[in-house]
């Protein structure tokens, strides 16, 4: 059964326990109390949630997860909420893994899969981060939140903030997809348009948040958005029945989805729920905005600001990311890589996937599909290796880009 808010079966849900222990900075290893409201570490690093995986290993049978409703809350033990009453949900997660037989054939991959995040409540995987982030903010007593966005995160947070009764301010580039602007306004978020990119929106939000005492929920500036996004990793592990794909390809902006999945796999491993090799993590970016790819190719540990960032795939138009060092580390320690594709390749692949597979994915997802061809050509994977692509959003949010016109037929028999 899909999750949501159907009546709980007996008292089992009430007895569920989170193994959340504390927060830790991956840069300087300082620890923080997870019962308090936290943003960044004193050293400027992001704070990451840590769980008591030893106790989880001793006390919990992971088969329990698949017996619960099919949404992201089934992984309660590895989520940061302490009380079930804090949960703000619209039915996020539990998305399908689908085969792409025709695209796979074209690329020389017998087992090409796509996980479709487009069916989430606001049409992107951003719902996962927003559901957990908003729920935890509410549990900690936060009332007013603010964030910059390239578009989709703002739409997701606006929906969950409305449902939770939190006040939200979002700032986005003035050319962010129109649909996402309309969504933020519809959900009642105070919506600002900013000249420039998400990085410029971030500066504006930060200044005002400091002045007004708003809680900043920008990517990795609070610790729990990533906890929501990591559930994609748990779902992949479940869908593949413990045997993970050889490679996972992720369209990378701030990179939180990729870091999140990598965190999920490592938690499962440390809890003793997963054996065998982890997937090669592949970050794909647009050629017009590829800070992670550049850093990867230059052998650097962190990325430099990408000047003049531009691409049709608005969700990955992120010129600098606070978690860059974590993305690079996950890619390298998994034996994966970072690569870029052009906008022309994105648009071509986007239309091809719709026609060949009946899937209207998003341009970011199309970038990831295209990257499957590249990693096969480079022989990072063999012809029989299962490869999974993340489609991060619904194509219907981007139809302004498709630019195709239907033929008008006159009604008379002229
Ligand atoms: C936000 C977004 C991404 C990038 O996600 P990150 O976790 O920030 O790297 C990719 N695709 C879509 C559709 C998005 O909205």
Image (cartoon, rainbow, N blue to C red):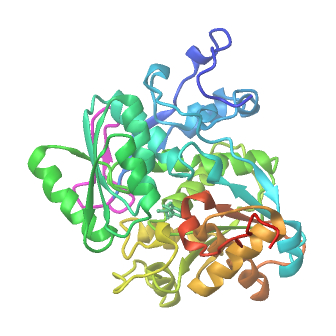
Q: Residue 74 placed where, x, y %? A: 64, 32
Please identify the quadrant where the N terminus is shown.
Answer: top right
Q: Residue 99 placed where, x, y %? A: 84, 60
- In this view, which residue lies farthest toward the top? 10
Residue found at x 50% / y 21%: 84
- In this view, which residue lies farthest toward the bottom? 298
Residue found at x 52% / y 69%: 252
Q: Nearer the viewer, residue 75 or 35?
A: 75
Q: Residue 382 placed where, x, y %? A: 85, 78
Give the vertical position of 74 relative to 192 (above or below): above
Residue found at x 40% / y 52%: 182
Give left or right: position of 371 versus 193.
right
Q: Main secondary structure of the magenta part?
A: loop
Determine which quarter of the picture holds residue 92: top right
Give left or right: position of 99 versus 212.
right
Identify the magenta region. Answer: 25-45
Please identify the quadrant where the C terminus is shown.
Answer: bottom right
**Is residue 178 something that shows in the picture?**
yes
Determine which quarter of the picture holds residue 277: bottom right
**Is residue 224 something that shows in the picture?**
no
- In this view, which residue lies farthest toward the left? 211
Q: How many marks?
A: 0
């Amino acid at each position: 059964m899909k999750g949501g808010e159907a009546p709980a079966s007996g008292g089992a849900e009430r007895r569920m326990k989170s193994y959340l222990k504390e927060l830790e900075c991956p840069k300087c290893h300082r620890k923080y109390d997870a019962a308090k409201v936290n943003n960044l570490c004193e050293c400027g690093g992001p704070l990451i949630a840590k769980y008591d995986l030893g106790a989880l290993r001793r006390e919990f049978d992971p088969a329990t997860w698949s017996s619960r409703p099919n949404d992201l809350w089934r992984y309660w033990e590895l989520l940061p909420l302490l009380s079930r009453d804090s949960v703000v949900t619209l039915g996020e997660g539990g998305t399908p893994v689908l085969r792409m037989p025709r695209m796979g054939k074209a690329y020389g991959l017998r087992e090409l899969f796509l996980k479709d995040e487009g069916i989430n409540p606001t049409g992107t995987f951003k719902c996962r981060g927003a559901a957990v982030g908003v729920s935890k903010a509410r549990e900690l007593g936060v009332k007013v939140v603010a964030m910059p966005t390239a578009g989709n995160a703002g739409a997701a947070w606006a929906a969950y903030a409305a449902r939770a009764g939190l006040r939200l301010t979002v700032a986005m580039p003035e050319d962010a997809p129109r649909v996402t602007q309309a969504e933020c306004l519809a959900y009642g978020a105070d919506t600002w348009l900013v000249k420039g990119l998400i990085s410029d929106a971030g500066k504006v939000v930060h200044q005002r948040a400091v002045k007004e005492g708003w809680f900043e929920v920008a990517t990795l500036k609070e610790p729990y958005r990533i906890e929501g996004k990591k559930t994609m990793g748990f779902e992949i592990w479940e869908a593949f029945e413990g045997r993970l794909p050889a490679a996972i390809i992720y369209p990378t902006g701030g990179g939180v989805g990729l870091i999140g999945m990598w965190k999920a796999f490592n938690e499962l491993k440390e809890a003793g729920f997963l054996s065998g090799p982890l997937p090669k993590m592949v970050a794909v970016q647009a050629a017009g905005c590829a800070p992670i790819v550049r850093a990867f190719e230059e052998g650097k540990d962190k990325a430099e600001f990408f000047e003049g960032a531009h691409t049709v795939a608005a969700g990955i138009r992120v010129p600098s990311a606070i978690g860059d060092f974590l993305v690079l580390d996950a890619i390298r320690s998994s034996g994966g890589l970072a690569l870029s594709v052009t906008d022309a390749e994105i648009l071509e692949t986007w239309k091809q996937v719709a026609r060949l597979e009946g899937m209207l994915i998003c341009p970011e997802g199309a970038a990831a599909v295209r990257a499957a061809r590249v990693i096969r050509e480079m022989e990072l994977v063999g012809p029989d290796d299962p490869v999974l692509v993340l489609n991060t959003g619904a194509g219907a949010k981007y139809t302004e880009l498709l630019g195709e016109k239907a033929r008008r037929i006159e009604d008379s028999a002229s």
